[in-house]
Image: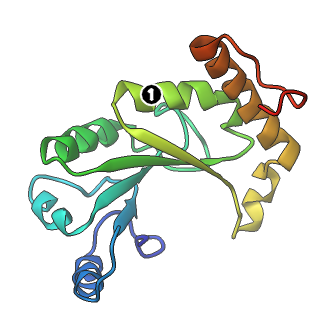
Amino acid sequence: MQPWPNRPGIVAGEIQVAKYAKKSGIKNLFLLTNGILINKENINKLKIFDGIQLSLDNIPTRWPLRKNYSNVLEKTVLLLQSKKIKINFYCTLCKNNYGEIDQIINYAKKLKVRIGFNTLIPFDANLEGQILSPLQTKKAFKKRVNRHFVEVFGLVWSEENGM
């Protein structure tokens, strides 16, 4: 479930929809949000969700295409963790951030939050120049996977060995 367009955070309607979804038997219901409106006053309402997915598209110091919510992101993570609410980061890769995958992953590790990635599908003509080609995406992840395999297994990912 994603917040309504152009409205950051949590709205009462989303909680209502979540309650209905739960009554209808839907499992694994996650709220996707930037997290800026999560606070001590509404945190207990979020327990209706099986988890919260917070957007993390850059190292929380820069990225000109989206607002920087880094001043509240770590507070939000700590608050959710204190209430034992499952958290995941999700990161949309684009030309502005694909060179920073390591830093983004390390930031998530520092906060002890799992992270997943997807690629940009622009619904705005201004973002079309940010789309990664399949080759750019593959190269970005191959570099990271190679580093991980060397660190953990002493192996290098390659096309020949199927890794």
Seen in the image, is 89 located left or right of residue 44?
right
Q: In this orientation, which residue lies closer to the viewer: 147 or 68?
A: 147
Q: How many numbered marks appear?
A: 1
The image quadrant where one finds the N terminus is bottom left
Which of the 4 quarters of the picture holds residue 140? top right
Is the residue marked by circle 1 packed among few (<14), some (14-19), or many (20+) residues within 10 Å?
Answer: some
Residue 121 position, x and y percent, is 71, 63
Q: In this orientation, which residue lies closer to the viewer: 118 or 161?
A: 161
Which of the 4 quarters of the picture holds residue 147? top right
Above or below 26: residue 88: above
Residue 151 position, x and y percent, is 60, 12
In the orientation shown, which residue stands out farthest toward the right?
A: 160
The image quadrant where one finds the C terminus is top right
Residue 111 position, x and y percent, is 34, 30
- Residue that label 1 marks: 107
Residue at 76%, 50% (x, y): give it: 130
Q: Secondary structure at mark 1?
A: helix
Above or below 85: residue 7: below
Residue at 18%, 43% (x, y): give it: 79
In the orientation shown, which residue stands out farthest toward the front?
A: 161
Question: What's the image's color scheme?
Answer: rainbow
Residue at 30%, 78% (x, y): give it: 14
Which of the 4 quarters of the picture holds residue 158? top right
Above or below 57: residue 61: above
Above or below 23: residue 71: above
Q: In this orientation, which residue lies closer to the viewer: 133 or 122?
A: 133
Q: Amino acid at mark 1?
A: Tyr
Residue 117 position, x and y percent, is 59, 47
Q: In this orientation, which residue lies closer to the viewer: 122 or 148?
A: 148
